Amino acid sequence: MGNQFELAKKEYEQWGIDVEEALEKLKNIPISVHCWQGDDIGGFEVNKNELSGGIEVTGNYPGKARTPEELRMDLEKAFSLIPGKHRVNLHAIYAETDGEVVDRDKIEPKHFEKWVKWAKEQGVGLDFNPTLFSHEKAADGLTLAHPDPKIRQFWIDHCIASRKIGEYFGRELGTPCLTNIWIPDGYKDIPSDRLTPRKRLKEALDEIFAVEIDEAYNIDSVESKLFGIGSEAFVVGSHEFYLNYALANNMLCLLDTGHYHPTEVVSNKISSMLLFNDKLALHVSRPVRWDSDHVVTFDDELKEIALEIVRNDALDKVMIGLDFFDASINRVAAWTIGTRNMIKALLYGLLMPNEQLKELQEKGDFTKRLAIMEEFKTYPFGAIWNHYCEQMNVPEKEHWLEEIDQYEKEVLSSRK
Ligand SMILES: C[C@H](O)[C@H](O)[C@@H](O)C(=O)CO
Ligand SMILES: [Mn+2]
């Protein structure tokens, strides 16, 4: 194996690519791993509701986490198979209230103490999301844009409470928490008035962000969407809405790779976003025909996203989070596959002769630009990746599957 790495390294070095430096950089790129892959976005509320908000989890693979302890244990297993130190992204529905019914507008940092204790033990940062779905007050598909001021206020209070929880995470863990607001609000059919709900959303957000939260500990972002199940014709929080809102209010836009038209790609947006914003957040997902949230694969768009982050020197500007949920396969494997792929794509980006390719483009030599890009696709990338896994003490190649099989036999299969 060592010899394969050395040979591969020499090939990259011929292009002036410093492989060791690339691996050092890779070690310091945190990926925010979404907890909700582990339990099909169920959460642990005492008065748990059916999943709503126009998103769907399909499949019934056995072994879903039923308790916070099981979810944390599964995350630990996944982290033991993923190289590097990462983050965990929580939703408000993952609060732990000791059997007490605590409605969403009343959640407090104390309901996340166990998550914080665990994150400290694991050495991971935490990110957060208010949950504006799977709740009786979101049953008609409207929350912050709801015409009823009482319902709107409930969700405004929930978002404010969530930002305070984000601040608590950041303070406790010494790494700022990204608190991301996504709402499902929209209409199934053609609206007769688009402006009024958008005006209400804008005003609700203004109220939420008027509450001062220490930016050293909490970073705010807003996530748009194109359509959802039941909001096919109109979504209040569209891309243009949040693009403008975020820019006008100096906060982060979060781009989810499943939230655009089928041929529209997030990789093509990153450079434009970074010219006008210091930072940007991502939900990396894989839409298959719709916003289906399939497990992220090592496909062309993933590589292009990673390349854009690397070649624009934006590793510390783009906050990379994942957002997929597949209940038709082993959920710990889903995390492992998707997160390893994200890291793999970043390594791929770091091992490209980006400077030379930029020069070729500037010179107008599009023949060589294409030729080199294509040839690099079959450079011995796998040997470098395997070496990185070995160096980071996680199984290389497909060997992590053996651990998943064992975990399934010993742990997951006993969950009914
Ligand atoms: C559960 C997530 O918050 C949710 O998936 C949201 O981020 C989204 O992408 C909705 O389509
Ligand atoms: Mn998302």
Image (tube, rainbow, N blue to C red):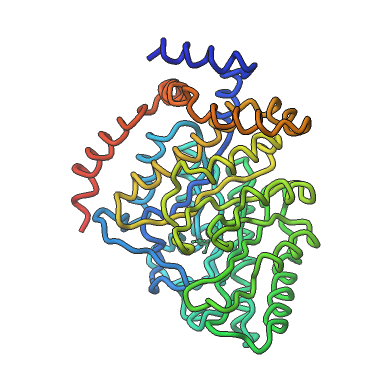
Q: Position of residue 197 (x, y in %)?
A: 67, 81
Q: Quadrant of the N terminus?
A: top left
Q: Position of residue 334 (x, y in %)?
A: 37, 47
Q: Position of residue 157 (x, y in %)?
A: 62, 72
As displayed, is residue 385 above or below residue 127?
A: above
Q: Quadrant of residue 208?
A: bottom right
The residue lying toward the viewer, choosing from 41 and 98, is 41
As displayed, is residue 52 above or below residue 354?
A: below
Q: Say which residue appears at 50% left-offset and 34% top-offset.
A: 85
Q: Quadrant of the C terminus?
A: bottom left
Counting the numbered discs, the total is 0
Q: Quadrant of residue 241?
A: bottom right
Q: Say which residue appears at 41% left-offset and 62% top-offset.
A: 41
Determine whether, in the image, residue 159 is placed left or right of residue 355. left
Q: Is residue 47 visible?
A: no
Determine whether, in the image, residue 32 is placed left or right of residue 98. right
The residue lying toward the viewer, choosing from 49 and 345, is 345
Q: Is residue 338 visible?
A: yes
As displayed, is residue 178 above or below residue 26?
A: below
Determine whether, in the image, residue 278 is placed left or right of residue 51. right
As displayed, is residue 147 above or below residue 36?
A: below
Q: Quadrant of residue 311?
A: top right
Q: Say which residue appears at 51% left-offset and 71% top-offset.
A: 228
Q: Position of residue 177 (x, y in %)?
A: 61, 49
Q: Say which residue appears at 68% left-offset and 87% top-offset.
A: 193
